Image (tube, rainbow, N blue to C red):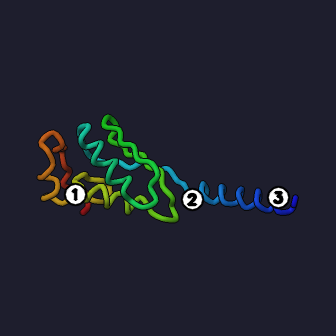
């Protein structure tokens, strides 16, 4: 009986360790202006499989994401954010998507950002 309890406890500990082992937190610069931008950016980042937390700060323009690096990467997160109209260091949002954003969400776009 003790062996069963000990093996069950060991299995639980290994499972808990595995869950937290792949979590990684990164900061990504994301262009935006207002609270609507914040909701849109956080929603896009959170929708990426493996992302457990997304928090964008409108003052610093930094998105802090916590994710499982076995399931996703910052590259995939940047692509998802650019898809909804917000430029990142490696991806520029399509002009059509950016132009559809509400007026308050139109930020200064740099010409040298990558697509």
Q: Residue at x 25, y 59 (%)?
A: 83
Question: Which residue is more in the foreground, 29 or 54?
Answer: 54
Q: Quadrant of residue 84?
A: bottom left
10 Å neighbourhood of mark 3: few (<14), some, or many (≥20)? Answer: few
Q: Which mark is residue 24?
A: none
Q: Residue at x 26, y 37 (%)?
A: 35
x, y percent for residue 69: 51, 61
Rounded to the nearest angstrom, the CA distance separating label 1 from label 3 is 53 Å
In the rendered view, does 66 fall on the left or right side of 9? Answer: left
Residue at the top extreme of this rendering: 59
Rounded to the nearest angstrom, the CA distance separating label 2 from label 3 is 25 Å
Q: Are marks 1 and 3 in contact (CB under 8 Å)?
A: no
Which of marks 1 and 2 precedes in the sequence? 2
x, y percent for residue 102: 14, 44
Q: Which mark is residue 6?
A: 3
Residue with the mark numbered 2: 22
Q: Nearer the viewer, mark 2 or mark 3?
A: 3
Q: Residue at x 25, y 51 (%)?
A: 86
Q: Nearer the viewer, mark 1 or mark 3?
A: 3
Q: Quadrant of the C terminus?
A: bottom left
SS at circle 2: loop
Which of marks 3 and 1 precedes in the sequence? 3
In the rendered view, does 72 fall on the left or right side of 45? Answer: right
SS at circle 1: loop
Q: Nearer the viewer, mark 2 or mark 1?
A: 2
Residue with the mark numbered 1: 93
| Numbered circles on residues, count | 3
x, y percent for residue 48: 38, 59
Q: Are marks 2 and 1 in contact (CB under 8 Å)?
A: no
Rounded to the nearest angstrom, the CA distance separating label 2 from label 1 is 29 Å
């Amino acid at each position: 009986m003790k062996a069963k309890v000990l093996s069950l406890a060991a299995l639980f500990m290994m499972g808990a360790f595995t869950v937290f082992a792949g979590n990684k937190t990164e900061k990504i610069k994301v262009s935006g202006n207002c609270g609507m931008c914040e909701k849109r950016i956080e929603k896009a980042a959170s929708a990426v499989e493996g992302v457990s937390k997304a928090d964008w700060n409108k003052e610093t323009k930094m998105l802090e994401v916590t994710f499982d690096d076995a399931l996703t990467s910052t590259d995939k997160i940047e692509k998802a954010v650019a898809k909804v109209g917000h430029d990142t260091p490696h991806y520029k949002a399509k002009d059509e998507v950016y132009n559809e954003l509400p007026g308050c969400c139109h930020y200064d776009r740099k010409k040298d950002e990558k697509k």
